[in-house]
Amino acid sequence: MKDYKKELDASRIPGHIGIIMDGNGRWAETRSKSRGDGHKHGSEIIEPVMDACIELGVKAVSLYAFSMENWSRPKAEISGLWNLFEYFFNTKLDILVGKGIRVVHSGSLKRLPPKIKRLLADVVKKTAGNKKIFLNLCINYGGRQEIVDGVNNWLERRKDGEMFTMKKMEKHLYTAGLPETDLIIRTSGEYRISNFMLWQLAYAELVFTDILWPDFAARDLYKAIYDYQQRERRFGNI
Ligand code: IPE
Ligand code: IPE
Ligand code: MG
């Protein structure tokens, strides 16, 4: 494989990358392992990907870890995922925090297990002063719900006769304060968005790769950013 890292234009690194980390189950299946093993291996990829993003100067990474629709999975898989998140928060995340990562959460707090809610709140608070890069954990996240939550949040404070605007929408999204989403990557060969960052993706570049998330590595990130840099972003202009 070409050395894509060398080919990158340092002046056009995406500010905010969203990643739909898909394919853990299929990765496990081809190895006759359990889906839980697939998720475990998938969680190991987060640190090297964040390291590579920090090195390149990416300002924010949004990771899709659990969708609101994922509640439809078997109970055992879901509880395994919460255990894995807990383990991740208590081990890996501490390492990342030490590297200057600021953790934020996108998603609904309703229905989240209390332990996860507490761990999330703690790490968000603990890292609030960190400046190196945002790590936006999308847990119990739905793009449509994000928009509905944001509108309701605004409605609670609405003054008489006040109209809603795109600016106000942006201020009330979970991603308020994060840079514009430039690139969305989906692994595992699925060509869909699955309710991820619906508002933010309006002008994002989309990169799909067949690689299953547990096999994803820094080189695949460089390749995705390289592909992104080959695109001409016109934003409606000519
Ligand atoms: C993505 O991997 C992780 C989560 C949705 C939590 P999947 O579990 O969807 O893996 P596949 O799509 O079944 O291979
Ligand atoms: C999207 O993957 C959600 C996450 C990666 C967390 P899914 O595997 O849940 O999406 P679908 O069901 O294939 O659309
Ligand atoms: Mg999947």
Image (tube, helix red, strand yellow):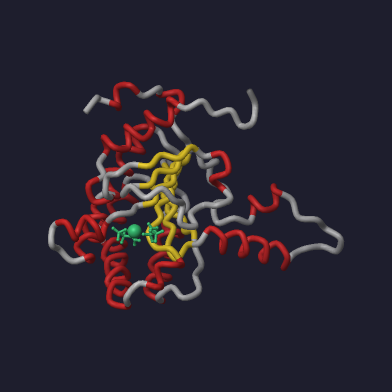
Quarter-of-image position of residue 69: bottom left
Front position in the image: 101 or 76: 76
Residue drawn at the location 35% of the way across and 72% of the way down: 73
Point out the quarter of the image occupied by ligand 2.
bottom left
Front position in the image: 224 or 162: 224
Residue drawn at the location 40% of the way across and 33% of the way down: 57
Q: Residue furthest left?
A: 32
**On screen, residue 51 above or below 194:** above
Instruction: Count every numbered label the image shows and give the total.
Output: 0
Report x, y in % for residue 220: 29, 37
Left or right of 48 on screen, residue 196: right
Position of the N terminus, as image quadrant, is: top left
**On screen, residue 151 above or below 225:** below
Position of the C terminus, as image quadrant, is: top right
Report x, y in % for residue 225: 38, 32
Residue drawn at the location 61% of the way across and 64% of the way down: 149
Front position in the image: 96 or 225: 225
Q: Residue furthest right?
A: 161
Report x, y in % for residue 17: 44, 42
**On screen, residue 225 above or below 71:** above
Residue drawn at the location 77% of the way across and 63% of the way down: 158
Report x, y in % for residue 184: 44, 43
